[in-house]
Image: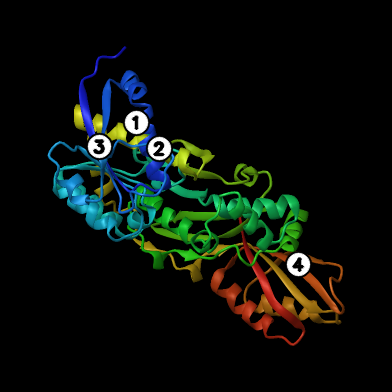
Amino acid sequence: MIKVKNKINIGVVGFGTIGSSVVKLLLERRRLFRDRTGIDLNLMFVCDKDLRSKRSVSVPKKMLTRSVDKVIRHPDIDVVVELIGGVHPAKEIITKALSAGKHVVTANKLLLAVEGEAIFKKAEEAGREIFFEASVAGGVPIIKAIREGLSANTFYNIIGILNGTSNYILSRMSGEGATFKAALKEAQSSGYAESDPSLDIKGLDSAHKLAILSLLGFGKKVGMKDIYVEGIEKISPVDIQYARDWGYTVKPLAIAKREGNQLSLRVHPTLLLSKYILSSVSGAYNAISIDADLVGKQVFYGQGAGKLPTGSAVISDIMDTASAIIYGKKSSRFIAAKRAEIKKIKKMDDVRTRYYVHFSAIDRPGVLAKISGILGSNNISISSVVQKERREAHVVPIVMLTHEAREKDMQSALKKINGLATIKRKSVLLRLEG
């Protein structure tokens, strides 16, 4: 057995689903952690406004408190674990904890996406650590990989399935042919989606995580306005099937790409060739593909959500914080350092990619020629085109793949095509990757 060198006192703020999981692990596996690391992780306080609701873990009453200040101000607390989520009052809790000389662990992706740079700067000024592995991809150690394991690399791109809810829904639509509404309802009943799933299905959750990864990988502060975001609500089983006919799988991707000294950032459903690894990631799992100069392409895969994977990530951060306290390891300074490699964020209008387009047109001679003419006049050339069987009277689906084109040109062409009298409903546009 390893001899215990020190005791680390911990205060957990937030006793919800994730907080309960972390508290349970700290109480039930304290001896295991001590035997493995030689560090005694001692839970002193659990703080929450609601202490009456039933949880999955029993906590001694002397540990429970409704006072955040009691946790932050207590002289013996070494680490404050923030698990309440949201921007306020989470930001104030973290900054107060840092100012009080406490180290911080958080799983708060929204806060870090919006206020990350300021919080990292505060940690640096206070000479304290802040760890946040659980903020992106749950139990997948992508933060540690980027900030430590791959710190010698220059990153070319970071592409990932960062939202398990969206991936679960598209997987069910692809595998079972379910409608979006049916797949969403199943995700909610299975516990993969909230009663209000807006952040997930609209792509905002993935955008928050992409902002964090971009700051880590490219040293560039990213605002939400810098990320193009499109959700999965308009995807239909029909388009998933048409894409499959061409050898593609539809996946909810978050994409950060270096293009010279510019960085393009986007979140949207994407057609991936079925041979690619990310195409095979199904259900509520997450995966992140990284392309860097020294290690080439690497893929990180695992459970991206849920109380156990996220709890595991939080405990890992507490362990790292404890090591930093005892052995003097510093890591927050890497986060706060500004790098000059990225000069600007590339506008979505200037992004170049290939496209999948599904037109619903009246079955009439000359319609395809008219569509092709508009595309051509906007500098868009067609790679493949298929006229599908009629799905309703007099209306025929026309499905195309284009060669690489500029987003602004594609949107201009689509606006003109959708205005034609022969187009019966708004056309479906999806982008290709790889």
Residue 161, percent from left and from top: 54, 50
Q: Amino acid at mark 4?
A: Val
Looking at the rendered structure, the secondary structure element under dot 4 is strand
**Residue under label 1:** 27
N-terminal label among 1 and 2: 1
Q: Residues within 10 Å of mark 4 (few under 14, many from 20)?
A: many
N-terminal label among 4 and 3: 3
Identify the image quadrant of the N terminus: top left
Residue appearing at x 49%, y 38% in the figure: 296
**Residue under label 4:** 399
Looking at the rendered structure, the secondary structure element under dot 1 is helix
Q: Amino acid at mark 3?
A: Ile
The Cα atoms of the two marked residues, 4 and 3, are separated by 57 Å
**Residue under label 2:** 57
Q: Amino acid at mark 1?
A: Leu
**Residue under label 3:** 10
For marks 3 and 2, give the one nearer the viewer.
Answer: 2
N-terminal label among 1 and 4: 1
Looking at the rendered structure, the secondary structure element under dot 3 is strand
N-terminal label among 2 and 4: 2
